[in-house]
Amino acid sequence: MGQDRINREERRDMDFQKNQLLTTEIIDISTEGEGIGRVNGYPFFIKDTIIGDQVEIRAIKLKKNYGYGRLEKVITPSPFRVTPSCCFHRQCGGCQIQAMSYEQQLAFKHNKVRNNLLRIGGFGPEELDRIMEPVVGMEEPFRYRNKAQYPIGMDKEGNPVAGFYAGRTHSIIANTECLLGVDENRTILEAILQYMKEYGISAYEEVSGKGLVRHVLIRKGFTSGEIMVCLVINPEHMKGRTGIREKNSKREWLPHQKELIERLVAIRGMTSISVSINCEKTNVIMGTEIYTLWGKERITDTIFVRDVDNCFARTGDGIAFSISPLSFYQVNPVQTEKLYSLALSYAGLSGKESVWDLYCGIGTISLFLAKKAKQVYGVEIVPQAIDDAKNNAKINDITNAEFYVGKAEEVLPEYYKEYEKTHNGETAHADVIVVDPPRKGCEESLLQTIVDMQPEKVVYVSCDSATLARDVKFLRAKGYELKDVTPVDQFPHTVHVEVVCCLHRVNS
Ligand code: SAH
């Protein structure tokens, strides 16, 4: 139940007072990760609570249809409560549901998808029982992220620190041990902080816009073991200058750069060390200019197809991806392999098919599909991602994948119209269409074109089951039947859940 979807009819005319103490039971978790409890039908959003907690709360904000409460006391803890592994989890807010057992997290995610398909998608409970699979979880739900971005700042004593922004603020809480990231993050960050301390290197200060080191980006290829470190820096003396690369022919971006490199190179797996120049006063982390200080410009990683009928065991089919500091790349490679293997299995390819992969990013799904299809067409709005996709096709010797830059809702309808014109009124057909849109889902005009192209199957990968349910409802009304739905836990300890599902054309 999201804040946006509170049933307005249920509101009772309660006169709550600000600061009033109330008791309630937590019955759901919002899209932001707050617990939700009702008092006489009026819903309160309460941070740091989990489903099943009996709590005392203080009413801190009262809106017409819902309010916010602050947790005063857990009266009876939920049977699903566990001691969080990270002592910073409340301050950080990254892992909203770490205090819930992993088993219960998966049950919560399953219900979230199910409820959206019920309420928004218009499916019946029995139907969902038949087509919905349990959530695909992780065996080890920690240390799953292959990418970390740490802000760098100074503590009160003037020592450089790396950590996370507290809540919605811009003050940094020092912590180099995020349990979602790889072990090496801590070693790398400590080497950088030590170097900064020894050589008096300043950290960026948001208010004044002064100071050198802003962020550290770390990426690790889980299969290859290759590590990339990129320091985002604000070399003020270069602000507004063009041709930085020429003027800086010695490639000295940091004072005592050699000493930093020596320390980082000693870390096992180190493959690429670079700086990214960002002199803007902005929340955007990465700058657009990247300069390699040591090693390669990119790291490589391989994603393997898994056998969905055999406990997701890896098969021999792997696809290599070349990743720059700016590349989009899925952050949980273990679960990505499961998610995309399911998508591939739902597509049911025999080698004869023509397939579209809309919202294709760097072509992760497209290249999986290309190995089993006749021809794949990928569409993606970000031009650099398409450059990556083409490069990835090349390094894997894949020649049957073509990529287009543009909005899916423009490229596909244009292709459809053009095809009709150039083929004497014959309509374009695809055997399978895969979509993996951002949270807002697909535009109706795109869904209509998909229907017009009469694919036998539509495979929908979604990061927001509410928009998925809306889009599936549309496709269903146009002759597509929902056959399989599998949620996949790409982000353990957070409220997010990915879903992959398959729709078949009726009478096809
Ligand atoms: N399937 C890809 C990425 C999916 S994320 C992978 O696994 O690598 C969603 C992608 O949709 C992003 O790459 C984003 O840039 C792209 N995107 C967002 N809006 C779009 C639109 N209107 N048309 C095409 N692509 C879009």
Image (cartoon, rainbow, N blue to C red):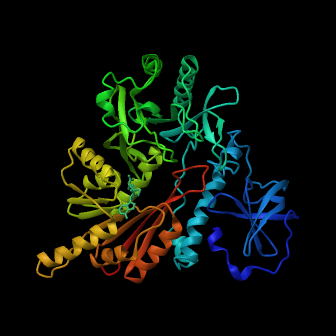
Residue 488 percent coordinates (x, y): 50, 56
Q: Residue at coordinates 69% horizontally, 40% vertically from top-left?
A: 88
Q: Is residue 192 above or below residue 9?
A: above
Query: In the visual, does 233 lie left or right of 384?
Result: right
Q: Is residue 1 visible?
A: no
- Ligand 1 position by quadrant: bottom left
Query: In the visual, does 209 lie left or right of 51?
Result: left
Q: How many marks?
A: 0
In the image shown, does 409 or 128 lie closer to the viewer? 409
In the image shown, does 277 or 308 lie closer to the viewer? 277
Residue 189 percent coordinates (x, y): 54, 28
Residue 318 percent coordinates (x, y): 32, 43
Q: Residue at coordinates 15% horizontally, 82% vertically from top-left?
A: 425
Q: Is residue 499 above or below residue 9?
A: above
Q: Quadrant of residue 417?
A: bottom left
Q: Is residue 429 above or below residue 314?
A: below
Q: Is residue 54 above or below residue 6?
A: above
- Quadrant occupied by the C terminus: bottom left
- Quadrant occupied by the N terminus: bottom right
Q: Residue at coordinates 33% horizontally, 70% vertically from top-left?
A: 409
Q: Is residue 420 visible?
A: yes
In the image shown, does 113 or 124 lie closer to the viewer? 113
Residue 256 percent coordinates (x, y): 46, 18
